[in-house]
Image (tube, rainbow, N blue to C red):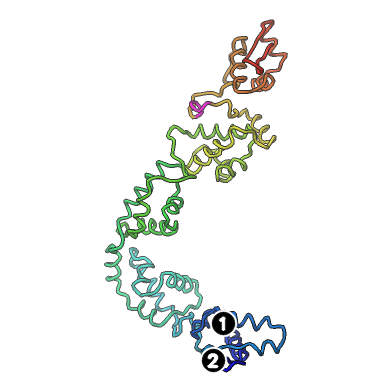
Amino acid sequence: MRADRTAATPVIEHVRHLIAQRPHLPVAAIARYAGVASSTLKSLLRDTRHEKSQDQAQDRTVSPTIAQRLLSVRAVDLPCRDRGYGGRSTDATPAIRHVQTLLSAHPALSQAAVARAAGISPSTLAAALHDVTAGRPRRIQQAAAQRLLVLDPDLLLIAALTRRSDTTDLQQVIDHLHNLQLRYDRASRSFIARTAGVKPSTLSCALLDHVRNPRRGIYTAIAQRILALKDLPPPACPRRIQITDTGLLRRLQALCTAGWTLKNIGAAGGISAKTLTAFIGHPHSTPALRGAILAAWEELAHQPGPSPAARQRAQAKAWAPPLAWDNETIDDPATSPNGIRTPAHQSPWTPDLLHHELSFLTHLGLSKAQALKRLGLGTRRAHQILGHTALTVGKGPRSISM
């Protein structure tokens, strides 16, 4: 053994005794209290745990300075969960009851303001309030308890009504959020916050505080990040004012007619199938729903879906397919689908009408059989309507002669 090293076995046994006395205390906390790097202590424990023989374990050494620091630590000196891990502590109930009285008597006060005035973290105060309200024992540092008990409600109210120098008016941020949501579909507040590099919870808390007390502001740096947003990236998309709920419903029904299930459509648009089902029953859209259906329409409308069952169910409900709609008319509630015979269309078939419908459908790429099926006619019925008139529809390889 080197002269500048000492055996690690007594040190490790002492540390293991400390861990047994404080099982809920992290090893890193013991290392910090002893003034030793946590990686050093963890490495020491890990190496001795994995030694293959007792001789190898006894050969493990450590520097005398580290050994002295660890051996000098006593279990009674370490933080204890029953004492709130805070050294000298006291029962939190009297101080927390005082805080509850202040909050009840002065609704304008927030827990965060009380915590800042007492010099403790808002999360610590919130946890203490939760435990005391639930009737569970809770201890806090004596100094913190004393500061809570001597809080002056008048001074707290003055501080609550006075905007901090590092904050700004939140109303301009609210107006900017509203304008962005008017310009873009799928522009939720959470998405806008993430795009601006702000935590969504931070923005939500600021908006909630503004509702409780409009004089409270928002940190200037956060406000500047949000106000700097002029345009939003995908999946937010510029709102098209001509898009109607009727048009959205038609798009959704048309995708189902093409063989896409609501699950497929929801996956393409980033929304749940349950939301789409609810929209079919009650067509009232939200920005997120508008963006999802439009995104799915752009991706899926020009290709057949994988589900024959979805196609059959849609056809049984007489839903129009994607090719039956034009971009200029799909959002107009007064228009009807092209090439589709509906109960509202009661005019009888004539040779000219049939010629017109077949021409339209074949120009869209349908075969003769597909066009007749779309019109709800068989070959024999088509011949009866046309009589002995020869009909040629389309040009080239897609032409139809009857």
> Which residue shows up at 50% across the image and 71% down it?
134
Q: Can I make out residue 161 in this image? A: no
Q: In this picture, is 282 found above or below 402?
A: below
Residue wearing tag 1: 41
Magenta part, dominant SS: loop
Query: Which element type, helix, strand or loop, lies under badge 2?
Result: helix
User: Where residue 6 sits: x, y (%)?
Assistant: 58, 92
**Residue 384 image position (x, y, % from top left):** 70, 10
Q: Where the C terminus falls, by quadrant?
A: top right
Percent across and percent down for residue 187 are 45, 46
The residue indicated by pointer 2 is: 64
Between the C-alphas of marks 2 and 1, the distance is: 14 Å
Residue type indicated by callout 1? Leu
User: Is label 2 in contact with label 1 (beta carbons under 8 Å)?
Assistant: no
The answer to whether residue 117 of the structure is visible from this angle is yes
Q: Give 37 or 203, whichever is nearer the viewer.
A: 37
Q: Which residues are magenta?
A: 326-330
Mark 2, mark 1: which one is toward the viewer? 2
Amino acid type assigned to the residue bearing label 2 in the image: Pro
- Numbered label attached to residue 335: none
Q: Is residue 39 above or below residue 186?
A: below
- Which residue is at 48% across, 42% downward? 286
Residue, x 51% and y 83% (percent of image)?
A: 36
The answer to whether 22 appears left or right of 89 in the picture is: right
Q: Nearer the viewer, residue 138 or 285?
A: 285
The answer to whether residue 322 is above or below residue 233 is above
Q: Is residue 321 left or right of residue 384?
A: left
Q: Is residue 67 magenta?
A: no
